[in-house]
Every structure is written in C-alpha cells, then in structure tokens.
Amino acid sequence: MTSRIPGADEFTSRPLPREELLRQVSPSLPLHRIDDEQAGRVNALTYEVVRHRLWAITQEMGETLRRMSGSHVVTESNDFNFSICDELGEQVQVGAYNVGLIGSMDLAIVWTLRNRSDNPGIAEGDMFLCNDPWIGGGLHQNDAAVLAPIFHEGKLFGWTTAIAHQVDLGGPRPGSFSPSAQDVFGEALPTPPIKVVRDGVLQRDVADAWVRRSRLPHLVGLDLRAKIAANKNAAEQILRLIAKYGADTVKAVMRRMMDDAERRLRAKLETLPDGTWTAVGYQEQSQTGDRGLHAIKVAMSKEKDRLVFDFRGTAGQTGIINCPYPGLRAGIVFTMLPLLAGDIPWAAGGLMRCFEIVTDEDTLTNASFPAAVGKGPFGPAWGSGNLVAEVLAKMLDAEPAHRSDVQSICNGTTDLCVVSGVDVRGGGSKGFVSPIFDVMAGGYGAQVHHDGVDTGGRLIIPAARAPDVEMTEYLYPLVALWRREQTDSGGPGRQRGGMSGSVCYVQHPDQVGAMALVVSGTGKVANQNVGLAGGYPGNSQLDLVVRGIDVPQLAGATAVPAGLDELGGDIEVLPCEGESALRPGDALYLHWQAGGGYGDPLLRPAGNVRDDVLQARVSVTAARDVYGVVLGEDDEVDVTATEETRDRLRHRRATGSGLTGTRPAPIGAPDLTGARRLDDNLAVLDSPAGRTVVCAHCSTEIGPLAGGAFVAALARRDAAPTDAGPHIWRDPSVYVDAEVVFRQLFCPGCLTAVHSRVVPVDHPLPLDDYRNWT
C-alpha cells in the first residue's frame, strides 16, 4: 500500500487541453464521447428543442435550490448559480444569477477528474462537495459547490454543479470573514472535493463534519441538501432527455452549443479593432491596520478573433485582498459574458475558448497558498473585472457599430458588512449572522446613448435582488430607519451613471447588548466605479456608525429621520477592513457604490440636468458646480447663467493645467469626414505624417496616435478629490497615507474632459491606451 502527501501546488487548478486532461483521467472511468462527425449530425429542429430544454433544466435547478434553502442569501438575494457541463467539465449552460460563481466551476471538475477518478473514484450516484478557492469550487471559502457526475449506461456523460454563498463556514469571526487574517489558516477552512454523496446516499459523516464548522449549522445543512436536490433533479431530467433523443444526440447538441457560442463571439471580435488597451485600479487597505493602495494592472490585446488579458505588474499578494487563479478567471468571465456576449447564449465553455490569461505568480490576482483569500471575489476578482470592463469599453467605443454596447463601470464592488449577535426578541436567545444585502441595489454605469440604471442591481449578478426590508427586520433584530436612492451618487457625465442607495439600521427596541460588525469595502478613496470618456466616477463607498443618536430605539419618535444630520450623535468612520460594534443608541449607515458617468458632464443637456434635480437624482449644488447648470426660482433653466457658469468652469480647468489665460475654443460639431472615433471626444484622422488624434468637439489637432503620444499633449489638472462632486469622500487620509487627487485630462483647445479619475498622485498616465490600435 502506498500513500501520497500532496504539496500545496497540487491543490491548484488550471485549464488543460482536452487531450492532456484525458491522459490524466483514470482508465477505470469510462467516458461518453462523440467524434466530430457525430457532433455534426443533429438537425436544426432537434438542436433548438434540446438546447432550450437544457436551458429550462438550469432554471429549474435554481428554483429547486431557492425553494429548499433556508438562507436569505439564496431566497432573497440570489447569490447562487448552477451549470450543466460535458464529461470533461466544459460548461454547456449556466444560470443568470451570480455569474462569478460559475467562472471557475469547470476548473473544479477538471481537478476532480484528475485527482478523484482513481481514488476514491467517480461513480454513478456520487457527488462531491468543495469550497477550495485554489481548485475553483468557489471563489472564496464561503462559496460552497456540489459537483455531480451524470452517468448513462455506465459511462460518464456529463456533470451538473450547484453553488451558493454560505453565511458562515467557521473561522475566527462570524460570517467567516476575518479582516486581520495573516493567511488562510486565519480564515474558514478550504476543503478540496470530497465525496458527500455515494451511490445516491448522503454520507452522514461528511455532512456532519461539514456543518460542524459553522455557527449556523442548520442553514449550512439545508443549503447542502438543496444543492444535492438541485443536481439530482437536473440529472433525472437530462437522463429523460437522453431517453427521448439518444445520448449521442444530446451530447452533439451540447457540443454544438459551445461551438456556436465560440463561433459567434469570435465573429464579433473580428469586427472590432486590433490593438492593446490598458487600465490600472487599486485595492485599499490590505487588512486591518494597513493604509496602503495596492495596484492591479491589465493590458488587453486583441488580435483578429482572440483576446489576451495580461495582468503582469500587479502588486504582490498581501493581507486578505488576494484571489487565486480561478478567481481572476471568474472576474474576466463575469464581465465578459454580460458586456461582450450579451446577445450570445451563455454556453460558457465555448466563450472561454476565446481568451487567454497571462499573470505572475504570488500576486493579488494569482495568489499562492497559504495566502488569505476570504476577500477574493469582492476584492481583487471584482477589481480585475472592473478593469476588464474598462478596456473592453475602450475597444468597443472605437468601433461605431458597437458603441451602443459601451458601458461605464457599474458599482465596482460590494460593501460587505456582517452583523452578528444573539437575538433576544420575544424572550428567546438565538445566535444570528447576517450580511447586509441591501447593498445589492447598486447603480449601473452610463452608456453612450443612455444614463445608467438607478439601483439596477449588479452587472455580475444579472438576477440580483435587494432583500425585502421587512424580511430583514423579521429575521434579525434590526430596524431600518431608511433605505433609499441617494442623491448625487451617480457619476456625473454627458450621460449620468445610475444612482446607488443608502440604508440606516438601528437595533430592535427589544434587543440588548452589542452586536458585532465586520466590514470590508474598497472604493472609499480610489473609486472602483470609474467613468469613461471624461465621465466622472460614481460615489465613494462610505460606512459609518453614529454613536449616541437622539432617539436610540425609535421609542417616542414622531417622525423617521430624513438623514444623518437629523440623527444627532457622533460619527465613527469605519475602515476599509476592520471590526466594530453596534450598540443600543447607535445607528449603522451604509452607502454603496453607484455607476460611473460617460462623457464630459459640461456637455450634458441642461434640460436633462433640470429633470435630474426635480427627480432628486442630482442636487441643485451639484447641478451648478459639476454640470454648470443654474435653475431659476421657477425651476426652469436660467440659460444666461448656465452659459456663464459653464464658461467659468472651463476657465477653471485651465488653471493648473498649463493653459492659464487661454480662452477655450468654442464647442461645436466640426466636419470630421473620414475620421474614425476613438470615443465620445476623440477621433483619428489620416494624414501624410501619420494618424493624428483630433478633438471631436473643436477639431483641435492634439497629437500622433502612435504609441499613445497624443496623451502627453493633453492638458492636465490635478485637484482635490471633492472637485469631482459632493459624492466623493472629502478626506482620503482617513483611510490611506497616499496623496490622492482628482486627475483630469482635457482637449488643449476647448478644454473638454477626456479622462477623469480619482487616483493616487503617482498613478500612470494612460499612455498605452490604443497602443498598436488598427
């Protein structure tokens, strides 16, 4: 008898070519496979019927999971997903819930095939439980997946997967998130695939060991059984489909679904310009006590029908703000699917063939064991997705036929706040752990022709929901003073970013003692929800506890407070990563992120700004100071005052940009016949000297396109962050030591903003944008 003690590097997963994977699967595991000739035999009618039935099966998986789960993470917020895969794990159909959760499911199946097919074996009626972020069965330990093989006539036909966020899986802090963890051993335990169902029977010893780690074993146990049931029901329906149409036909449809998705995405890529686009973003505070900014960098190269995402140069792994390779891949997937494949069926296995990833080891986005990775999905994975969204938008904006697909960055991360304690309402005594899921109601980024959707949800969770406030109050000893859309939160621009919201909770009047708070959120200084083409970022994320409010538990209150200034008390600003407490007499305030704007806000039609003011989307102050629009006492636009104000704001842009005293060129609609757009503000003209970038508003020649040289000729101004508007946090030094500025680049002629970003002062200029653009 021999035994093997695996090293940490063996608990990692990467994509493998199919033939290489086949060589690593145990010969004792028979696979159902078809050749290319068999794959091409299915007729069009059968293809459509079977394809839609597979889609319906995935939807029914979601309903099964939702109906059986007792967790409001699933039932109220839709933080789960599922997939149907072929025999080697390629995803044929995925759900439209949390797309990030299926961004690595195939990797988990690949690892299981390589490492479990011989011992303990993969057999009919088995299922595997996994929450290991390095393997891909979840993006952090709270994401737990059940992987279920499907057998037909003794051969492995395919797989189904069901995955959901678990409220608590152990670790030193309620909610399994520890902002002070030094490594993964200070977090919840990651578990590689273990056989939780054998021959159709739940293994009680494994299930007991699984729920024993949790502070909420009843919820974790229910979710485990719900995922098993979802997989079981899906397998039964797929086998019925096979019985009707034949295994080879169903597999042929699965193969064609992925091939069609790949073909359609490659065809779309062929219509887009070749080139390289870059972006840099930041994660704030790597853990409790840290005051740094940590950079993530991406250069996206597109050549013909293929994309390469190069993350080299990203900061090294540190603190808790790390994700392994599967998390990075998920960040790309949950951005690409809605933005680049929104009109293509999500046969993710085919879509993933169209890109490759280049990354250094031991970095924020490719962390090595035993790094702390609890923040992986909503830290570096989401941060990488934001940067991918930015470079994709730049590429799409440069092609007129695809400008309608351009979208500024949506709410750039989640605002994690876990409240825990003992619920003593009604004389009981029951422990509870509750992430505040109201933050699901984020704002969408602005588009070229439309404002962003206000509190529309989350790009990465198309079916995201903010929970019913009354359900939150029923389940937990909290009372909501308000949950509402927040004026001025959307990023200013020619098209405004969608608004986000805020929520304010106090303890229930019957509650006694303190509740524990664990908080984590980026975008408090260097905004994650950036704008495009000169559009401003959305609001800074802000978490506060107000101590000693005037009406602690609403007893005797005659009106609900309208805002923080009516609460009284002393404000405690919560850190990006840290812990606190909510006591009787305190109020918890969370203000999550909105969408970024698109285009210079001084170009927004004054009538649109007026409508925004009347609908409480924009304040009168922001209308004047950011958009340059002045309203009279009758709430109509004061045309003369608006023209004067916008002229004054343009002159102010010249101050500090090297153009002081220069009169801005008039805005108009110059003849750009023969020019090709780069975005809302810039175009390219061919000349004997080469390609020259010109302003689309005043026709000023800015500089050569080659190598991004024109960027150096743009006027530049660094100002206080609050120059971006009242939605930007006034004092970055509360969070970080770095000097932070509102940096804008302008056309040197008309001073139209072409780039607007809140960044550290040493943030690089976008010189590499449009490198090799064709």
Image (cartoon, grey):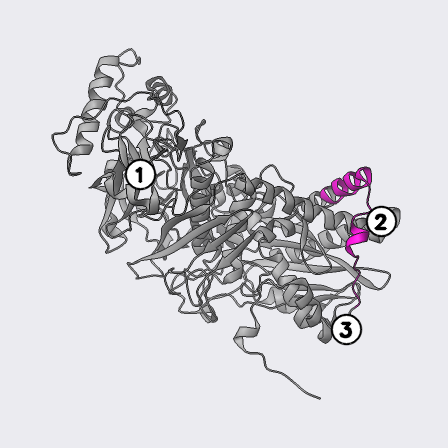
- Secondary structure mostly seen in the magenta stretch: helix
Q: Earlier in the sequence, mark 1 or mark 2?
A: 2
Magenta residues, as a range?
30-55
Q: Is residue 576 visible?
A: yes
Residue at the front extreme, as displayed: 688
Among the 4 quarters of the image, the one containing residue 203: bottom right
Mark 3: which secondary structure?
loop
Q: Which residue is mark 2?
A: 240
Would you say 635 lies left or right of 54 here?
left
The mark closer to the camera, 1 or 2, is 1
* SS class, disc 2: helix
Q: Secondary structure at mark 1?
A: loop
The amino acid beneath tag 3 is Pro
What is the number of the mark on residue 689? 1
Locate residue 741, reporting x and y percent. 24, 45
Q: Residue at x 77, y 47 (%)?
A: 253
Disc 1 vs disc 3: which is toward the camera?
1
Q: Do residues under tags 1 and 3 come within 8 Å of each other at their CB atoms?
A: no
Looking at this view, name the residue that lies furthest to the bottom: 1
Q: Is residue 70 visible?
A: no
Give the residue type at disc 1: Ala
Give the residue at mark 3. 27
659 lies above or below 195: above
Q: Position of residue 345 (x, y in %)?
A: 65, 41
The residues tagged by marks 2 and 3 sit, at their Cα atoms, a distance apart of 28 Å
Disc on res. 419: none
- Residue 569's quadrant in the figure? top left
Q: CA distance from mark 1 to mark 3?
A: 64 Å
Question: What's the distance in space between the residues labelled 1 and 2, CA to CA?
Answer: 67 Å
